[in-house]
Each structure stands twice: as structure tokens, then as C-alpha cells.
Image (cartoon, rainbow, N blue to C red):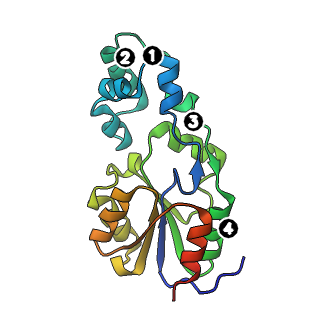
Amino acid sequence: MEYKGSAVKQLYIFDMGGVVSHNRDVLPAITGYLGITQEEFIAFAGENIRELMEGRIPSNEFWSRFSKAYGKKVEEELYFKFFNPSLDEGIIGIIKHLKKSSKVVCGTNTIDTHYERHLILGDYDFFDAVYASNKIGISKPNPDFYRYILNQEEINPEDALFIDDDQDNVLAAESLGIESILFTDSGSLYGRLGCLK
């Protein structure tokens, strides 16, 4: 894979779901299985979603709390049951190229069961390090999420580039002085990174 320019950042931070992997949205399958709307699911889950994503409660506790609000016991780990991610080979190629001259890490909002599935599938193997919300206890777009990564990597904001498909996450990173790209597709990212001088 040839790029027009060379990597100019010391650190590249890639979001996982929606950038590196696809088929991540399990909510339609879960709500269909439970026979409720997505709005009802979010209402039943409440703040427990954030607690699960930041590793403050395990998935069995999440489903226990959800079951009480839902009025029926959920017997299975539905986040795991319906999670079947697939990797974007174009993005993997970009990551491999960037790693020739820079460090490339994953900065992801996730939950324990999705984190474990990605580990089992080897989806994190392309990265030099993984910073997952459920492990570090902070989630995007909290600015402390990005500060944590910069501190761990001993990198200044201007020496990092962040790629995410969520505009709020991109804006939060930019507010700290981290150059950021709102991801749309691998072809556009290829062009953008290839033009970096």
C-alpha cells in the first residue's frame, strides 16, 4: 500500500466500532428479541449503560438491574449473543502502514462482553495498545478519556491524531488540541492520511 505522504504524528488513536469493525450495533437485535422498542430499552437500562461501559458494573449486574425495570428476567447475556463484528480490511491496511513509523492504539467505548469477543477474535492484535472504556473507567467524549491515553503514551496533544465516527467524540478530542478526523469510510481516510505533510 503506497501513501503520498509519510506519517507525521507520533501517535494515532483509532476508535474500534464503526471505524475498525462493523456490525457492532446489537440494539436492534436485542430489542427485537425482547419485543420492545429501542426507546424502551434505553429507558429500562438508564444510567446502567454508562456504568457497564465504564466497567463499574459487570454484565450480569447490568442484566439483573435491567430485568427489574423490564419486569421479566433476562436469562442470557444478550450483548454477547448478538455481537458479531467484522473488520474493515481497508482500515487494517492503513493501521499496518502507520505502524511502520508511528505508534497506533485503539481508543474505544465498549463493554466487557464485547471487549472479550474482540480479544477472542484477535481484533485488537493490530494495535500497539488498547484503551477500552470498560478497563480504564472513563468513556468518550469525556476529555479525561483522551488525557488518559496521552498520559499513558507520554505524548503531547499536538503529536497525536484521533479517528472516530462520532462527531461528539471528535469535537472532544479537538478541544484538547488533538487533530481529529470524523471517519466516514476507509477510502476517504486513506486520502486524508496520504495527504498529511
Marks 2/1 in contact by CB < 8 Å: the verdict is: yes
The residue at which mark 4 appears reads as: 93
Please say if 24 is above or below 100.
above
Q: Where is residue 157 in the image (x, y as percent from the top left)?
A: 34, 76
Q: Position of residue 1 (x, y in %)?
A: 72, 76
Residue drawn at (53%, 69%), measured in percent from left and top? 104
Q: In this view, does 148 lie to the left or right of 25?
A: left
Relative vertical location of residue 156 with respect to residue 80 in this rendering, above or below? below
Identify the image quadrant of residue 40.
Answer: top left
Q: How crowded is mark 3: few (under 14 residues within 10 Å), some or many (20 or more)?
A: some
Instruction: Classify 24 as above or below 196.
Output: above
- Residue 24 x, y percent position in the rendering: 54, 42
Q: Is mark 3 on a helix, strand or loop?
A: loop
Q: Which of marks 4 and 1 is nearer the N terminus?
A: 1
Task: From the image, tell me which residue sits under label 1.
Answer: 74
- Snapshot quadrant of residue 187: bottom right
64, 28: nearer the viewer? 28
Identity, as a three-letter code, of the amino acid under mark 2: Ser
Query: In the rendered structure, which amino acid carries the disc numbered 1?
Result: Val
**Disc count in the image?**
4
Q: Real-space Cα distance between discs 2 and 4?
A: 42 Å
Q: Which residue is drawn at 34% across and 35% down?
A: 49
For residue 67, which numbered disc appears in the image?
2
160 sits to left or right of 96: left
Which label lies toward us, 4 or 1?
A: 4
Vertical order, 37 against 23 (above or below)? above
Q: Is residue 95 left or right of residue 181?
A: right
- Secondary structure of residue under mark 2: helix
- Secondary structure beneath disc 1? loop
